[in-house]
Image (tube, rainbow, N blue to C red):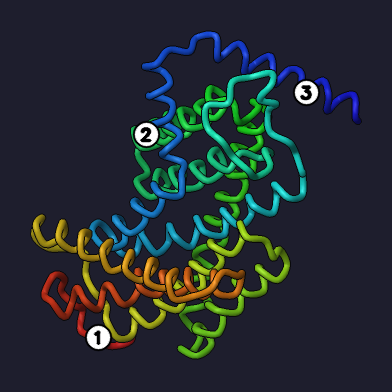
Amino acid sequence: MHEFLMSLILWGTEAIAWVQQFRTPVLDGLFRAATFLGEEEFYLFILPLIYWVIDKSLGVRLAFAFLPGVYLNSWLKEFFFTPRPDPAQVARLVEETSYAFPSGHAQNSTVLFGFLASHVRRRIAWVGSALLVTSIALSRIYLGIHYPQDVLGGFFFGAVYLLFFLWLEEPVRAWLGERTLLVRLGLALLVPACLLLLHPTQDAIIPMAALAGLGVAHVLEGKWVRFETGGLWWKRSLRFAVGLMLSMVTYLGLKVVFPEGGFFRFVRYGCVGLTVGLIVPWVFVKTGLAASEGGTER
């Protein structure tokens, strides 16, 4: 087994070196841009954009698919315990501190863009998603921070997880729809907390805290706010700008107030999730930036 792993690393190093022989300043910039589409900052942009501006239901479903997938990738990295390419043998154009296998960029982008393509259900969406995911994965090799086997593993686990989620989504939604408000609130907090206890790492705190906050927000928003994502383009644009501002105020304000530590990190990101999913939509309705369906329970 050891010899096999060493041969795999040797092959992966040679593959990176082959790709990097084509390096130019232009390609450096293009692949840095491509890798940004798999970064946390991009997801913090695209998820609220869909939820606040484009399609609330799609945004909620996408978040509930994406965040557990990020947690899964964190667990898999710790389980496989695989080092990244040696900077003495390949050029590393960016720095990463987590383990290598499977690639989080490849896995998470497979889940996000694959989910969106499954919603659109058109060939052009599948082709576009495949091109984006492939570009993101190739950028990780070009930048010298993943072996090819890392991104292939990310494709595999992302696709398997996404298929599993899509298979379970409707039965779970139907089951939750029959539960009481208190049960749904309890599950929104309990499930992420239990998952975090099973895998209590810093990388797992953010997705599970955000999942808890968004889960609670989704239940309460459906009862008390019920905002709609339609409206004139300027209202949609203003919604997005106001929402980002309020979310950043929550995040930065709590970062200043709370001390460092896993518990406070969980609370901070949970509050951000609650702000994104409930407080911001409430502000939209109260300021007339979004219409409300009426405020009655579904």
Q: Which residue is mark 1?
A: 295
Can you say whether 6 is above or below 222 in the image? above
**Residue type beneath disc 3:** Leu
- At x 23%, y 74%, the residue is 227
Residue 53 falls in image quadrant:
bottom left
Q: Which residue is mark 3?
A: 8
Can you say whether 250 is above or below 24 in the image? below
Can you say whether 221 is above or below 72 in the image? below
Q: Nearer the viewer, mark 2 or mark 3?
A: 3
- At x 28%, y 69%, the residue is 246
The spot of residue 224 in percent (x, y) is 30, 86
**Residue type beneath disc 2:** Arg
Quadrant location, the C terminus: bottom left
**Marker count (numbered):** 3
Relative horizontal placement of residue 112, taking residue 73 as reference (left or right): left
Alpha-carbon neighbours of circle 1 within 10 Å: few (<14), some, or many (≥20)? few
Q: Which residue is mark 2?
A: 123
From the viewer's side, name the closer residue of 173 and 202.
Answer: 202
For label 2, the SS is helix
From the viewer's side, name the closer residue of 141 and 69.
Answer: 141
